[in-house]
Image (tube, helix red, strand yellow):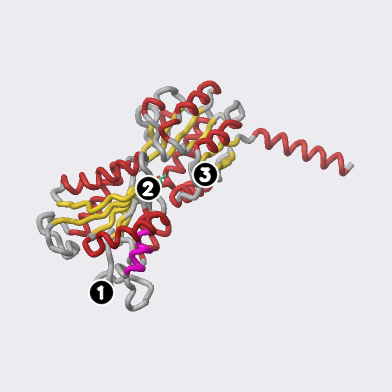
């Protein structure tokens, strides 16, 4: 009798399980510090939902990602969340989704508008890189003072020009290109003079930035008045090297840099990682721009929920632009704020 009950229970459980919908989430690369936080925010946001999240690390390979996506292109998986490895080649993914009538929510790595236009059941959740550059420029203006014609003491050589080194993210990524271009443009438009000593690509990566600084310091060293990084991971990597060259020096060994009495070099990032907030508190990182993955995760998870329930998106809590785009604002974070 016990055996029969156990069997019945197992059957009942598996019947229930098959009814719970799974939404697969494909992350371009979990070794990316920001995406690792983003992924855990998606898991957290999805906890109260009545569908399950199953997440995949595509290890920065579009080939791996395509293989991971394939088994989910069928009627059992009506919604897929995709952070594409190669944002320029989502065409094939969209075509498959179309044949299968699945909905795709892309995020963080923005596909081309012409690809998104191929299908109506496709969305993009992201943040406007131009806004992050403008806010980062505003952090820099806060530091050098409100009067572009009369910079304060952070203009070390007092030549009226901000000497900067830029650490650039992954080539071809919408955020790396726009952040680099518009941080300079915003400063120039606000009448600040900026001399870019070098733009060095470190692929969003802490260790790469750390090594690259080894090459940049001998070239520019004391000339650098600010290090502008396209993201926090690279900013924090650069800080590590700057520490070894005593550009940051905790002379009194109290664990905190007091920039009024101890060596310090301004470094600004973007993302607002948890470790960056710590670095700001300890006086190292000057500031960052929060690339709000909590809100983006909430938006993704809600959108999937509404789509699964077949609700009309007319009253969806996040604004939908052109029927496809859901934009989340960046926010400035620094000790000054
Ligand atoms: C950017 C973020 C970078 C990196 C990249 C990955 O938005 O600022 O740190 O994670 O996304 O696509």
Q: Does the magenta stretch include residue 238?
A: yes
For the residues bearing labels 3 and 2, Cβ distance under 8 angstroms:
no
Q: Which mark is residue 261?
A: 1
Per the model, the C-alpha gap separating discs 1 and 2 is 32 Å
Q: Nearer the viewer, mark 1 or mark 3?
A: 3
| Span shown in magenta | 237-245
Could you tell me which residue is drawn at 21 percent across and 61 percent down?
A: 223
Could you tell me which residue is drawn at 34 percent across and 42 percent down?
A: 175
Q: Main secondary structure of the magenta part?
A: helix
Q: Does the magenta stretch include residue 222?
A: no
Name the foreground residue: 181 vs 123.
181
Residue 72 screen position, x and y as percent: 59, 32
Residue 253 screen position, x and y as percent: 36, 77
Q: Does the residue labelled 2 lie within 8 Å of ligand 1?
A: yes
Per the model, the C-alpha gap separating discs 3 and 2 is 22 Å
Question: Which element is circle 2 on?
Answer: loop
Q: Which mark is residue 59?
A: 3
Going from N to C along the chain, the mark reached first, 1 or 2, is 1
Could you tell me which residue is drawn at 12 percent across and 60 percent down?
A: 159
**Residue behind mark 2:** 291
In the depicted structure, whether residue 211 falls above or below residue 133 = below
């Amino acid at each position: 009798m016990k055996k029969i009950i156990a069997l019945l229970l197992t059957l009942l459980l598996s019947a229930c399980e098959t009814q719970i919908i799974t939404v697969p989430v494909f992350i371009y690369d979990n070794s990316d510090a920001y995406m690792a936080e983003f992924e855990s925010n998606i898991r957290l946001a999805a906890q109260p939902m009545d569908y399950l999240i199953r997440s995949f690390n595509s290890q920065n390979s579009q080939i791996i990602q395509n293989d991971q996506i394939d088994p989910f292109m069928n009627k059992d998986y009506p919604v897929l969340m995709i952070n594409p490895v190669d944002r320029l080649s989502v065409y094939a993914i969209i075509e498959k989704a179309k044949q299968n009538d699945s909905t795709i929510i892309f995020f963080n790595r923005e596909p081309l508008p012409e690809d998104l236009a191929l299908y109506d059941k496709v969305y993009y959740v992201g943040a406007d890189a131009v806004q992050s550059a403008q806010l980062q420029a505003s952090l820099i203006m806060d530091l050098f003072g409100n009067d572009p014609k009369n910079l304060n003491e952070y203009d070390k050589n007092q030549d009226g020009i901000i000497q900067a080194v830029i650490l650039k993210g992954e080539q071809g990524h919408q955020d790396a290109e726009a952040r680099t271009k518009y941080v300079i443009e915003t400063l120039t438009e606000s009448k600040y003079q900026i001399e870019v000593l070098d733009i060095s690509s470190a692929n969003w990566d802490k260790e790469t930035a750390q090594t690259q600084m080894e090459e940049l310091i001998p070239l520019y060293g004391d000339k650098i008045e600010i290090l502008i990084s396209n993201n926090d991971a690279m900013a924090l990597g650069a800080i590590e090297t700057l520490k070894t060259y005593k550009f940051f020096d905790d002379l009194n060994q109290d664990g905190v840099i007091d920039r009024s009495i101890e060596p310090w070099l301004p470094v600004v990032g973007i993302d607002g990682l948890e470790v960056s907030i710590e670095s700001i508190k300890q006086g190292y990182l000057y500031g960052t721009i929060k690339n709000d993955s909590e809100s983006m995760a909430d938006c993704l998870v809600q959108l999937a929920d509404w789509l699964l329930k077949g609700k009309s998106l007319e009253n969806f809590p996040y604004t939908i632009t052109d029927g496809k785009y859901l934009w989340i604002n960046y926010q400035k974070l620094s000790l000054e704020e």
